[in-house]
Amino acid sequence: MDHKMIQKQKKRWSVMDTVILLLVLVAVAGLIYRVVYAARKDAEADPTLYRVYFEVLETHEKVLAEVEGFDAVYLCENGTRLGYIGVYQDTATGEYTAALTVTPAEGATGSDRVTATGILICNNATPASGGGLRVGDSGRYLTPGSVLEIRTDRALLTVRITSVREHS
């Protein structure tokens, strides 16, 4: 008789079996979600970088002296982070300096007014038609010829975009 009871107990499906099965399914679903989420996050964490070449419109030379390589750059109008000031590495000293080429302002003989050209490494943008970039979710486009105000932590600059290229 004991043998028949044992067989009956083995064939029964209990509530506890259902709970355990559900917990295992939830654990597997959670693991799959984490793997997919991590893959998406990794793809987003490695954005394409772009070089945005610009011309600083006439400003005081002391303002440009405040701009350093790797300075974070933001749009003044809404604070959206664009990227950082590009740099050149001095081959002799190994030091990095801001990628700005300063020239006296046109017709400003003996003046402290200067213009400059530089590079912004943009890491918060996607390509747009016309050779430009769409900046983050701001709806702002960086296209050759556009004029905008940018800021670093120490300087405010008005710049004209001269070209946009993928950073290699």
Image (cartoon, grey):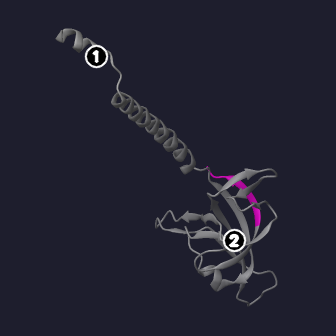
Residue beneath the point at 77% across and 88% down? 109
| Residue type for callout 1 | Lys
In this view, the residue farthest toward the front is: 1
Front-lying residue, 93 or 64: 64
In this view, the residue farthest toward the bottom is: 110
Q: Is residue 164 magenta?
A: yes
Residue beneath the point at 74% across and 70% down? 55
| Residue type for callout 2 | Asn
Classify 125 as above or below 33: below
Residue 149 numbered mark, or none: none
What residue would you read off at disc 2?
A: 78
Mark 2 vs mark 1, foreground winner is 1
User: What main secondary structure does the magenta stretch of the protein show?
Assistant: strand
Q: Position of residue 54 (x, y in %)?
A: 72, 66
In this view, the residue farthest toward the left is: 2
Magenta residues, as a range?
161-168
Q: Residues within 10 Å of mark 1 (few under 14, many from 20)?
A: few
How many numbered marks does the figure carry?
2
Front-lying residue, 133 or 92: 133
Q: Position of residue 84 (x, y in %)?
A: 59, 65
Q: Give the structural element (helix, strand or loop) at label 1.
A: helix
Classify 96 as above or below 16: below
Tell me how far mark 2 sits from mark 1, CA to CA.
68 Å
